[in-house]
Image: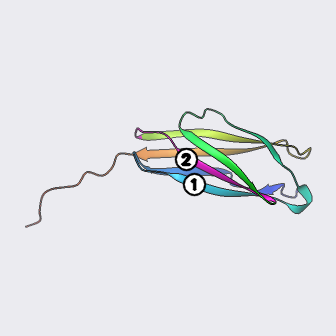
């Protein structure tokens, strides 16, 4: 089977709480499968913000962490296309936030 488009299967958002965690990925339709993305939505959307920008024949997906507490989370971003070949692209988002490391004020002797 020929690939419909090149896109990430999963996006990882790893870091510490209160850190700005933003990831960008490019979605590139294969030349024989030109399509447009007509609608986007997150399965849950509680812990992520995302945007999609079109440039010529490709798209840039920007995903930003919104979660402010330590721990893991997951979500899915759905990109609905106007193609009869593949109606929807689904990308899994996995986030894992940890507490910032505490600085040790002890001096070495």
Spot occupied by residue 37 in the image (x, y as percentages of width and height):
80, 46
Residue 32 picture quarter: bottom right
Task: Identify the image quadrant of the C terminus.
Answer: bottom left
Spot occupied by residue 6 in the image (x, y as percentages of width and height):
76, 58
Residue beneath the point at 60% across and 38% down: 75
Q: Are marks 2 and 1 in contact (CB under 8 Å)?
A: yes
Most extreme residue toward the bottom is 109
Helix, strand or loop at disc 2?
Answer: strand
Residue beneath the point at 85% across and 41% down: 87
Residue 56 left/right relative to 60: right
Q: How is the image coloured?
A: rainbow
Residue 107 picture quarter: bottom left
**Residue with the mark numbered 1:** 23
Residue 67 colored in magenta in the image? yes
Spot occupied by residue 52 in the image (x, y as percentages of width and height):
69, 48
Spot occupied by residue 63 in the image (x, y as percentages of width and height):
59, 48
Residue beneath the point at 49% across and 51% down: 21
Magenta-drawn segment: 57-70
Residue nearest the viewer, comparing 101 with 35: 35
Residue 63 colored in magenta in the image? yes
Labelled disc at residue 64: 2
Residue nearest the viewer, comparing 89 with 63: 63
Q: CA distance from mark 2 to mark 1?
A: 7 Å
- Disc nearer the start of the sequence (2/1): 1
Residue beneath the point at 54% across and 52% down: 22
């Amino acid at each position: 089977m020929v690939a419909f488009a090149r896109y990430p299967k999963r996006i990882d958002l790893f870091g510490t709480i209160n850190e700005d965690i933003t990831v960008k990925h490019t979605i590139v339709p294969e030349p024989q499968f030109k399509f447009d993305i007509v609608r986007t939505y997150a399965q849950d959307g509680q812990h992520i913000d995302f945007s999609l920008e079109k440039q010529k024949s490709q798209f840039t997906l920007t995903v930003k962490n919104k979660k402010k507490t330590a721990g893991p989370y997951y979500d899915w971003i759905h990109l609905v296309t106007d193609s009869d070949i593949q109606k929807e692209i689904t990308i899994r988002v996995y986030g894992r936030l940890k507490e910032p490391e505490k600085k040790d004020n002890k001096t070495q002797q």
